[in-house]
């Protein structure tokens, strides 16, 4: 009688496929490329401004195609968030604006519980903004993007109550 060794392995190489997906998925860092803010209700408007520049080639739609209000998330930025804002308490209303001198910018904001908010043009201006209600206390990662990948553009980001 011939001894047959039992087959041990993974059919179809599924373990390799899973490892490939895990290593190919970009990791979003908990640090920002530029300045961060920590805000409490009653914050001074002049202290809620940070600066940075665009220039990444990472598609923001890879984070989310649409936000909580079904707005499309578009643009290219760096895989790391440009800014991190920590809200010390809940805010009933906030507005986050980009000022690049009128260039066409986009915004993606990822908040607590992975709530996504995206913005594009502000009225007749091409600079992006996001305005809304129910900003929960916690950490918000912010990406400022452009429609074209790799285009460097200086901007100022302002948070208003």
Image (spheres, rainbow, N blue to C red):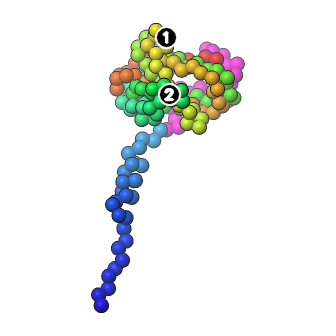
Residue 62 disc label: none
Relative to 62, residue 9 above or below: below
Label 2: which residue? 70
Percent of width and height locating residue 85: 58, 28
Q: Residues within 10 Å of mark 2 (few under 14, many from 20)?
A: few
Quadrant for the N terminus, please. Answer: bottom left
Dominant secondary-structure state across the stretch colored magenta: loop
Is label 2 in a helix, a strand or a loop?
loop
Magenta-highlighted residues? 29-50
- Nearer-N-terminus badge (1/2): 2
Determine which quarter of the picture holds residue 10: bottom left
Determine which quarter of the picture holds residue 152: top left
Determine which quarter of the picture holds residue 95: top right
Percent of width and height locating residue 117: 53, 27
Percent of width and height locating residue 106: 45, 22
The reply to whether residue 9 is in sight is: yes
Residue 123 disc label: 1
Percent of width and height locating residue 132: 59, 21
């Amino acid at each position: 009688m011939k001894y047959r060794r039992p087959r041990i392995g993974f059919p179809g190489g599924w373990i390799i496929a899973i490892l490939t997906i895990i290593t190919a998925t970009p990791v979003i860092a908990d640090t920002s490329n530029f300045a961060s803010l920590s805000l409490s209700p009653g914050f001074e408007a002049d202290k809620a401004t940070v600066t940075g520049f665009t220039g990444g080639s990472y598609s923001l739609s890879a984070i989310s195609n649409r936000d909580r209000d079904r707005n499309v998330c578009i643009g290219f930025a760096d895989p790391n968030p440009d800014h991190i804002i920590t809200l010390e308490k809940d805010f009933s209303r906030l507005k986050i604006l980009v000022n690049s001198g009128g260039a066409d910018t986009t915004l993606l904001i990822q908040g607590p519980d992975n709530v996504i908010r995206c913005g594009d043009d502000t009225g007749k201006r091409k600079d992006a903004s996001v305005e809304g209600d129910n900003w929960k206390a916690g950490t918000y990662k912010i990406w400022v993007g452009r429609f074209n990948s790799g285009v460097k553009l200086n901007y100022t980001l302002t948070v208003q109550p």
